[in-house]
Image (cartoon, helix red, strand yellow):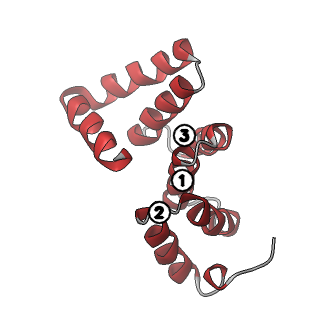
Amino acid sequence: MEDTYYEFGTSADRWDRAQLFFEAKEYLTAARILGGLVQEVPEQVAPRLLLARAYYHSARLGKAETQLREVLKRDPVEDYARLMLGRTLERQGRQSEADTHLRMVQAMAGDLGPELLAQEQRTQG
């Protein structure tokens, strides 16, 4: 693929641009920008999590799963990543694996479980 204008600039510029593309539901473009950011700063969770979300929304579920598992390796208590992993596994027809992660989210979130699910529905809309 050839480079385009949105892949240039500082990391902060590209992060902002990726968020704008994501909010505009241009998930493939957002993923392209975020992929470069993740390579540059692999230790940061936020770009990787947004990349996973972009993959999820563009039905690139295997790639979403890979990024979510990497997020959870780096931050095992990232409940939103665990919830997304559960939903990603569900969409792949892997319900028993999904149930494990979804139960963990519920246990981690406690009373916040319904709130977290509501947040997920808002971001998926």
Residue 72: image quadrant is top right
Q: Please say if the residues under marks 1 and 3 sit with CB atoms less than 8 Å apart.
A: no
Lateral position of residue 4 relative to residue 24, left or right? right
- Residue denoted by label 1: 54
Q: Please say if the residues under marks 1 and 2 sit with CB atoms less than 8 Å apart.
A: yes
Comes first in the chain, label 1 or label 2 = 2
Residue drawn where x is 66% and y is 65% of the image: 32
- Circle 2 sits in a helix, a strand or a loop, which is it? helix
Residue drawn where x is 61% and y is 87% of the image: 9
Vertical position of residue 65 compared to residue 22: above or below: above
Label 1 – label 3 distance at C-alpha: 17 Å
Residue 42: image quadrant is bottom right
Lateral position of residue 77 relative to residue 4, left or right? left
Q: Nearer the viewer, residue 104 or 91?
A: 91
Which x, y percent locates residue 14? 56, 78
- Residue denoted by label 2: 22
Vertical position of residue 57 compared to residue 83: above or below: below
Q: Amino acid at mark 3?
A: Leu
Q: Amino acid at mark 2?
A: Phe
Residue drawn where x is 46% and y is 37% of the image: 84
- Residue denoted by label 3: 72
Residue drawn where x is 56% and y is 65% of the image: 30
- Circle 1 sits in a helix, a strand or a loop, which is it? helix
Marks 1 and 3: which is nearer the front?
A: 1
Q: Nearer the viewer, residue 58 or 82?
A: 58
Comes first in the chain, label 1 or label 3 = 1
Marks 2 and 3: which is nearer the front?
A: 2
Which x, y percent locates residue 57? 51, 47
Label 1 – label 2 distance at C-alpha: 7 Å
- Give the residue at the far left of this rendering: 111
Q: Nearer the viewer, residue 90 or 81?
A: 90
